[in-house]
Image (spheres, rainbow, N blue to C red):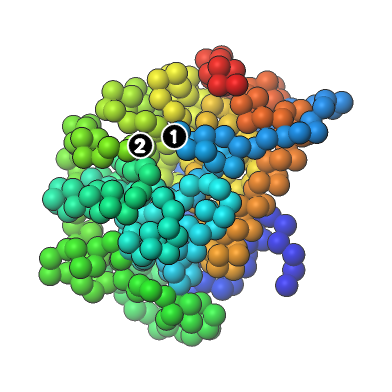
Amino acid sequence: MTPITCIEDLRQLAEKRVPRAFFQYVDSGSYAEETFRANRADMERVKLRQRVLVNVDKRDLSTTIVGQKASLPIALAPIGLCGMQHGNGEILAAEAANKAGIPFCMSTMSICSMEQVAEATKRPFWFQVYVIRDRGFIADLIARAKAANCSALVLTVDLQVLGQRHRDIKNGMTVPPKIKLSNVLDIMSKPRWAMSIMNAKSKTFGNLAGHVKGMEGVNSLAQWTNSQFDPTLSWEDVAWIRSLWPGKLIVKGILDVEDAKLATKCGADAIVVSNHGGRQLDGAPSSIAMLPKIADAVGNDIEVMFDGGIRSGQDLFRALALGAKSCLIGRAYIYGLGALGKEGVKTAIEVIRKELDITMALTGVTKIADINRSTLATETIPEETHVLELAETRKAAAR
């Protein structure tokens, strides 16, 4: 096999090995995909400042994320249907994250259940929830997360209604799913993938099956889930979640300064600057464009995390320089999972680790806390992505 040198190599291999409908489920955005593309385009516009003749012999990539030690300033993001990229996908990703010394976050809409992941890994992990119409189900889900020894709860707040994803509709990834001959033929051409799914511990929505009254099959659970998105969601509901959860609470889906300020008042320990990977409001700004503004506004009051468009260690460095304390990676590791299973996830993490390490050396820094605006080529930073002085002050105080 050709050596894997970057995340794009994993993406191309995953595209060959995962059925089209499931690959494009993670490799696409909503509507015209303007925001999906902007996440990458704006990221690449942020240029780094090369430094020379600086002693960078001893570099330390470790940090803390919501009080937890991590070998890298990244966590694996929650991905719905993760287990459809490779059988037991959630378990394999959690094991790879544990091996690398970084957090893994499991989605409510996973294929494996949280209990299966807890049993297989024997290590704490994060769990992601939505606030849906059935508040009783959410309360029970949070209680299960406590019992599974989850160390943080990630509350996704940007999915009150579902953005339309054209490619999902064309591929039959609808509610209920539409079985198309082309999909059947595509799956038949992917025996490696099919075998991993057949041998998996779970073949339905593991966190829902057996816990939603009268709903067991994939179709019925998908229909129930689709009916549960709640457009009445408010900050009072976030406060209610806070009252149920005694551990670290991370609010994911913040893309506006005013919303970030409100998040600091609801008892959250961290926020994630995110546009849902370009899968919700098309036409919204890129995550990287809003990061410095949000970090400046609330960075002294709450831990700021970032999600959206990271495909390399250089991208990770850019986000840290623009005010994030740590970042979530989603597509980067899910490509690895689809390409090579657990080894692919480990490879994705290692690729980003090596790239970050070399980038730190070539920009003259040896610690994560030293990554700030001074490490960027300021004349190349678009006006909307400039980082303000407060973010630099916060970074300096963390040293």
Task: Look at label 1 and name its amino acid.
Answer: Val
Judging by the rendered image, the residue that carries numbered circle 2 is 248
Image quarter of the N terminus: bottom right
The amino acid type of the residue labelled 2 equals Lys
Viewer-closest of 259 and 383: 259
At mark 1, the secondary structure is loop
Q: Residue at x 55, y 17 (%)?
A: 397
Single out the residue that lies furthest toward the front. Answer: 122
Q: Which residue was labeled with disc 1?
A: 66
Where is residue 292 drawn, in percent x and y? 51, 25
Foreground pick, 276 / 38:
276
Residue drawn 19% across and 52% down?
Answer: 140
**Mark 2 surroundings: few (<14), some (14-19) or many (≥20) residues within 10 A:** some
Residue 144 vs residue 50, the one in the foreground: 144
**Point 33% across, 24% down: residue:** 264
From this viewpoint, which residue is outermost toward the right? 53
Numbered marks: total: 2
